[in-house]
Amino acid sequence: MSKDDPMSTRAGFVALIGEPNAGKSTLLNRMVGAKVSIVTHKVQTTRARIRGVALEGDSQVVFVDTPGLFKPRRRLDRAMVAAAWGGAADADVVVLLIEAHRGITEGVEKILETLTELEGRRVALAINKIDRVEAPVLLGLTQAMNERYAFAETFMISAEKGHGVQALREWLAAEMPEGPWLYPEDQIADLPMRMIAAEMTREKLTLRLHQELPYQLTVETENWEERQDGSARIDQIVYVARDGHKGILLGKKGETIKAVSTAARQELEEFLGRRVHLFLQVKVRENWLEEAERYSEMGLDFKDGNA
């Protein structure tokens, strides 16, 4: 049967929600099989609602990787939380991801309260990082969570190691509504390549700069030029909020930005399967956190940031 025959295929949207660092991006990348969402050890790194597309049998599962749900302080934070809940409301199925070793935190409690507003949505629970706790703890957490909310199904997984991920994927595929596929078979994400390239560079910056600075910067792909020899020239601008940040970013004799550029270029080349010439520029733009244009570049709604 053809994938264009709506009677033989299924397609729908799945929203991954949870606290920052719960493993949403790692799970998305594991499900899709390609790196489309920024994965770092710093909290709160996923900004845009990146969609990854997974194919399982006759089903196409489109993942909305929402920013982590946390207590918003700034306009950017508020826009990110609004995007997270917006993704959940738009999805056919919601997967709440929690960390086994952290259990039911204050943040998880707040998410559970808000979940009751998602009427008519099937919500699955995925307990991640199961290798960090003993079986009795895991069973106790499963019971406690299901007493608080009527989850359609509970999965115990390790997104990093892949344990239990296939079972979750197969269940999601079966839950998708009948209908034609939403994306071409070879398309892994509907995020423009420019934005994926910017995310890769921002990941390298986040890994390199361990303090608060990563949340005070954004990366934009200003120019993408396809060359005759099959390579691509990519020009990116890193916006920072203060002059002092620019110095930190450049590093002694430009060493930091050079190292970031090299790491990002290598990953881009691997992702695209061809040579890449990457050029990074650092610019100070004091009020970038208050500029609507920066938000649309990240796939967020500026209005959602209003207090």
Image (spheres, helix red, strand yellow):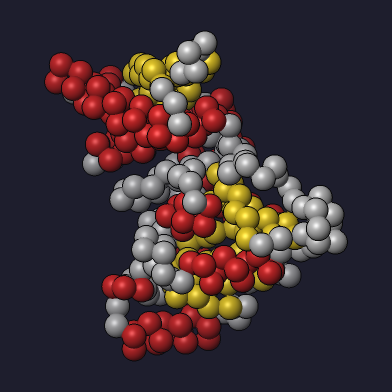
137, above or below 101, in the image = below
Decide which of 101, 105 is in the foreground and name it: 101
Decide which of 162, 196 is in the foreground and name it: 162
- How far across and how far down the image is residue 285, in percent? 40, 20
Q: Residue furthest top?
A: 228
Decide which of 253, 119 is in the foreground and name it: 253
Q: Quadrant of residue 14?
A: bottom right
Q: Is residue 273 visible?
A: yes
- How far across and how far down the image is residue 92, in percent? 70, 62
Q: Is residue 222 visible?
A: no
Decide which of 108, 298 is in the foreground and name it: 298
- How far across and how far down the image is residue 232, in percent? 47, 18
For image coordinates 45% across by 35% down, the residue present is 271
For image coordinates 57% across by 48% down, the residue present is 52
- How far across and how far down the image is residue 33, in percent? 49, 51
54, above or below 276, in the image = below
Q: Quadrant of the N terminus?
A: bottom right
